[in-house]
Amino acid sequence: MEKWLIRSTKTSLADLGKNQVEKILYRIISNRGIETEEELEDFLNPSLSKLNPAETIKDMLKACDILIDSLGSSKIRIIGDYDVDGIMSTYILYDFIKKLNEDTDYRIPHRIKDGYGVNISLVEEAIKDQVDLIITCDNGISAFEPIELGVENNIKFIVLDHHEPKVDLENNIDFLPKADAVVDPKRRDCPYPFKGLCGGAIAYKFVELVGSLLGFEDGEIVRDYLEFAAIATVCDVMELVGENRIIVANGLKLLNNTTNLGLKTLIKESNLEDKTLDPYHLGFIIGPLFNASGRLDSADIGLSLLLEKDIKKAKYLADNLRELNIQRTKLTKEALDLYLQDIDFNKYYKNNVIVSYMEGVHESIAGIIAGRVKERYNRPTIILTDGENGAKGSARSIDEFDIIKAIGGQKELLNTFGGHKGAAGLSLDIDKIDEFRRQINASSGLTEEDFLRKVYIDLGLPTSYIDENLIESLEIMGPYGNKNPRPLFGAKDVYLGNLKLLGKNKNVLKMTIREDSHLVDGIMFSNLEEFIKELDKINKPLPNLLVTGGEIKADIVYQGTINEWNGNKNIQIIVSNFRIKEGM
């Protein structure tokens, strides 16, 4: 079931529009939280000059001084993370610092052998290797014991992180590691106004400030590293508002003309060479390739590709990433089928919180499966499999439910847990899974209303309003992504006819959409199974309609696009949601 909601704002931005297209555009922009003319100007012109000064992040200047003082005489080690954000963060720091300090190297923890972030064994290795300075990126804010061990052995520590610090609720302060500098905008005592930066963006701002302090030419750091911060921002699913919008908008311009051999090779091998890259390509094509290395092998492969200068070796590494992603896709599909069977057989989909455990599944894909199951049932989902000591897994949640708070409420049953409102990780003994499932459901407080899918419509708009001018005008709202989705419109009482199934798997539905006397091409890429079920309910099965060409009356939620084929352009409506009303 779905609940359709029209976004409603109280601003008068739409009144600034000089014509119908501008009024529609400004109304949608106001739906993104833009309230004033000044904010409108910033939104429409995401200039790098509007980034907040990096030195206003707590401990950032201290971190820069530590690095600058270490150059030329120290052994420096960067410790990153195995996801896209961690890989990009590590690349930015390593490539920059290595040019200034020859004795610089990096470590990216192995997802299964090492777990997340800097740990005791990595610090012990650094002590043995006589490392003078460790810089963590995309991790470190909660690494209390490893950092304390390093500091006790005369290793300086700079933490560059964006995750939430642990909080002393009684005294309303953060628990911070005993590093020499802790750079994290989410620190309670950090005055930096934008808290939503990812690890790659913080690494970028760090090297930019160091470069400025060292007298680098204006724009040099921007050209070298901004595109990698943009990839990290999109792939870590950060909100594309404020500084993140600026970073991604400008980073994409560089990325579409990248000089990095590894990226160019990966883009070519992914058949994207002739495309204008946008957040979709980063989030659903490029990002998963880097993530696959960290899931099934070592994230060093992805980082090595970015550092590679030989075209043959770059092609080999790019092909390796593609093969790993194919393998990851296959493993995910097989495992998802197993979990869905378990969930259906045990009717876990009726629970407020779905908890499913299966043996023998690669633990690195638990998060992907949790996300897929959550999307299917629109319920908080926890997917568990075998870990080194019992069960280990990942959780994904709906907006209405704080999953980490719920998991933390059962901490007496757990071995470890961590995360945030929408996603978390945990481990527990296998014999405690049933009790954990019972308790987290008993205390969830969720209602049936919470499980209704929310579809947010920007504007009720007849399909006849959709033309090339409007569609092209809306592109100024990009880059699209988290918290800045592509505009969705709603239309009532339209007629869907001339239905045809397309694609090798017959999973795309082509149609014409008639509204009064206006006709436009339409297409549906998702929710086809639900569409077929709704047709059956009104005794209008799809196979019959495919033969007769009959029409169906419906309300629809849609996007307007321009379809280009064989040099021809035409307006096309992408139907994302529907309410079938009757047959004809």
Image: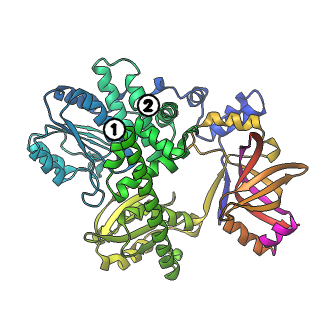
Res. 196 mark: none
The quarter of the image holding the C terminus is: bottom right
Q: Secondary structure at mark 1?
A: helix
User: What crowding class fits label 2: few (fewer than 14 Cα within 10 Å), some (14-19), or many (20 or more)?
Assistant: few
Span colored in magenta: 539-566
Is 333 drawn above or below residue 555 in the view shown?
below
Q: Residue 546 location, x and y as percent?
A: 81, 67
Q: Residue 509 location, x and y as percent?
A: 73, 60
Is residue 546 rendered to the left or right of residue 516? Answer: left
Q: Secondary structure at mark 2?
A: loop
**Residue 384 image-quadrant placement:** bottom left
- Does residue 191 appear in this view? no
The amino acid at mark 1 is Leu
**What residue is pinned by disc 1?**
307
Q: Residue 247 location, x and y as percent?
A: 47, 33
433 or 331, which lies in front? 331
Res. 259 mark: 2
The quarter of the image holding the N terminus is: bottom right
165 or 578, which lies in front? 578
- Residue shown at 43%/74% (left/top)? 356
